[in-house]
């Protein structure tokens, strides 16, 4: 029903039914101007329509309702914000839980790190203590080696004196034998009667200073023989400087010599060739004193290698001697004269400074194959030049693996003189005239069986013969004077 009053139109819904309802409206009709009349009202009956939107908004609605609506909207916004904050708080709690686990793990890692640092410090102290102990042992070993060398030097001097006394005793025993023979001859002549012609006396040796009286000898005395190996120790004599040559041996006439005596002088010689020329045809240990020095040394003379007179300066044969030594040991020499040994850089220098010497290197592998390499000249510079190597022309069937080292200084673990950025002696496990690093390494590690496995090529090898990964069985380096040397 639509009602109109004072120009205002109001809509009202009827509750009589969904289809038969009517809408009433009242409207004021404008009266004519001239005859004023009373107001009138009209009533219209229209079918009810289904309302889909807002019907009416009363702008004069009370302010309390509006305020309630505003507060409800703000409350909804506030609830939404609270839900949002709650979700963020839950997210932060989850992050805090995760971070808390990480913090615990970090604490555990820090604790383990402190434990590891403590363990590393303990290991470092143990290692330092071990290094100090080994250094002390090395010092004690060096002192002991010096004492042994001194004792060996004294033993050598006593051996020389004993040899002199032996020669004197043999001479006196021979003289006593001759006198006994003369006495026996005179007794026989006395028993036969006085001779018509006096017998011609036997030749007597020149008068010699007689020792204290001894009881008469009833039968000829045969002095014991001594081999040369028992007279000289087989250890390397690194530094021998006697005050003077040994006393001269007494001379004897050839007619009065005992069958046990020898006319061969016992040295010392300047090298093994001089010993060969002196009549010593067998290989063995000899006492050598080079010219222009009072330095005595023991060497092995190889008189069997054609043509003889070879002085052995290095030998490897069974791996019984460690060749990974320091500078001072390589300078003085080490090993056993009748086995594996290194004569010593200083000794080799004095030997080769006497004249022109040639070098012979004999090699043997584990299958029995033997080869050699010979160099027309060989010598070392003095220690001031770190024993620099000088070799001449090569010939042989082993291949030339030494010329590449010509002109190089000697290098050991504690003295690096090679051309490599590192220390070749550290990698090659020996001492040699390394270049950068080696084509030959005869002072390396003696590996049994030939082919060896190692991080580096540190065996006893000659690169031109069986290569650097093959450790040879036997190696000998020997020198001999070569008057026809051409460099």
Image (tube, grey):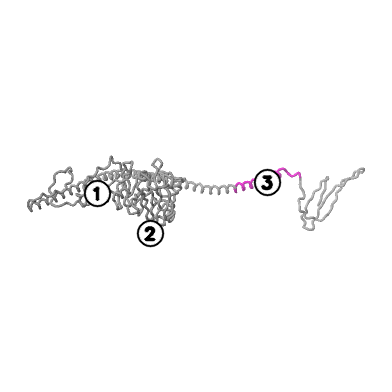
Q: Residues within 10 Å of mark 1 (few under 14, many from 20)?
A: few
Q: Nearer the observer, disc 2 or disc 3?
A: 2
In the rendered structure, find residue 263 and report the number of the disc placed on it: 1
Picture coordinates of residue 163, whole percent (x, y) = 23, 47
> What is the distance, in whole Å, between disc 2 and disc 1 at their CAs?
40 Å
Closer-to-camera residue (244/111): 244
Q: Disc 3 designates what residue?
A: 73
Q: Disc 2 designates what residue?
A: 368
Q: Residues within 10 Å of mark 2 (few under 14, many from 20)?
A: few
Which numbered disc flags the more N-terminal residue, 2 or 3? 3
> What is the distance, in whole Å, between disc 2 and disc 3 at their CAs?
110 Å
Residue range highlighted in magenta? 59-87
* Residue 390 appearing in the image: yes
Closer-to-camera residue (4/327): 327
> What is the distance, in whole Å, between disc 3 and disc 1 at their CAs?
139 Å
Q: Measured along the vertical axis of the image, is residue 369 above or below residue 155? A: below
Picture coordinates of residue 376, whole percent (x, y) = 40, 49
Indicate left or right for 328 with 254 as reference.
right
Question: In what element is the residue under mark 2?
Answer: loop
Q: Main structural element of the magenta stretch: helix, strand or loop? A: helix
Q: Nearer the observer, disc 3 or disc 1?
A: 1
């Amino acid at each position: 029903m639509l009602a109109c009053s004072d120009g205002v139109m109001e809509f009202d819904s009827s509750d009589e039914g969904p289809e038969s309802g009517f809408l009433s409206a009242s409207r004021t009709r404008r009266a004519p101007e001239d005859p004023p009349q009373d107001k009138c009202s009209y009533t219209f009956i229209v079918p009810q329509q289904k309302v889909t939107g807002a019907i009416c908004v009363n702008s004069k609605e009370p302010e309390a309702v509006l305020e309630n609506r505003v507060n409800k909207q703000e409350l909804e916004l506030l609830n939404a914000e609270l839900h949002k904050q709650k979700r963020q708080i839950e997210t932060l709690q989850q992050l805090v839980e995760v971070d808390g686990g990480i913090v615990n793990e970090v604490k555990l890692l820090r604790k383990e790190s402190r434990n590891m640092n403590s363990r590393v410090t303990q290991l470092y102290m143990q290692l330092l203590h071990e290094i100090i102990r080994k250094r002390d042992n090395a010092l004690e070993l060096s002192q002991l080696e010096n004492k042994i060398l001194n004792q060996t030097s004294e033993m050598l001097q006593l051996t020389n004196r004993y040899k002199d006394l032996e020669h004197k005793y043999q001479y006196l025993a021979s003289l006593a034998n001759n006198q006994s023979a003369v006495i026996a001859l005179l007794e026989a002549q006395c028993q036969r009667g006085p001779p018509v012609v006096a017998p011609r006396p036997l030749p007597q040796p020149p008068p010699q200073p007689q020792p204290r009286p001894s009881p008469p000898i009833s039968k000829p005395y045969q002095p014991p023989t001594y081999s040369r190996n028992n007279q000289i120790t087989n250890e390397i004599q690194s530094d021998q400087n006697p005050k003077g040559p040994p006393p001269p041996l007494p001379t004897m006439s050839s007619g009065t010599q005992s069958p046990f005596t020898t006319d061969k002088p016992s040295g010392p010689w300047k090298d093994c060739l001089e010993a060969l020329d002196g009549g010593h045809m067998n290989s063995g240990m000899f006492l050598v004193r080079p010219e222009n020095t009072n330095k005595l040394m023991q060497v092995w003379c190889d008189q069997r290698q054609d043509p003889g007179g070879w002085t052995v300066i290095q030998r490897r044969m069974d791996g019984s001697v460690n060749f990974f030594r320091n500078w001072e040991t390589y300078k003085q020499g080490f090993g056993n004269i009748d086995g594996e040994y290194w004569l010593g850089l200083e000794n080799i220098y004095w030997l080769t400074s006497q004249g022109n010497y040639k070098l012979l290197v004999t090699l043997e592998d584990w299958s029995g194959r033997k080869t050699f390499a010979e160099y027309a000249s060989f010598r070392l510079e003095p220690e001031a030049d770190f024993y620099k190597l000088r070799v001449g022309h090569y010939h042989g069937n082993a291949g030339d693996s030494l010329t590449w080292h010509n002109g190089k200084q000697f290098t050991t673990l504690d003295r690096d003189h090679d051309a490599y950025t590192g220390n070749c002696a550290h990698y090659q496990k020996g001492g040699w005239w390394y270049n950068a690093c080696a084509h030959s390494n005869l002072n390396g590690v003696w590996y049994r069986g030939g082919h060896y496995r190692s991080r580096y090529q540190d065996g006893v090898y000659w690169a031109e013969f069986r290569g650097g990964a093959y450790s040879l069985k036997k190696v000998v380096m020997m020198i001999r004077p070569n008057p026809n040397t051409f460099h």
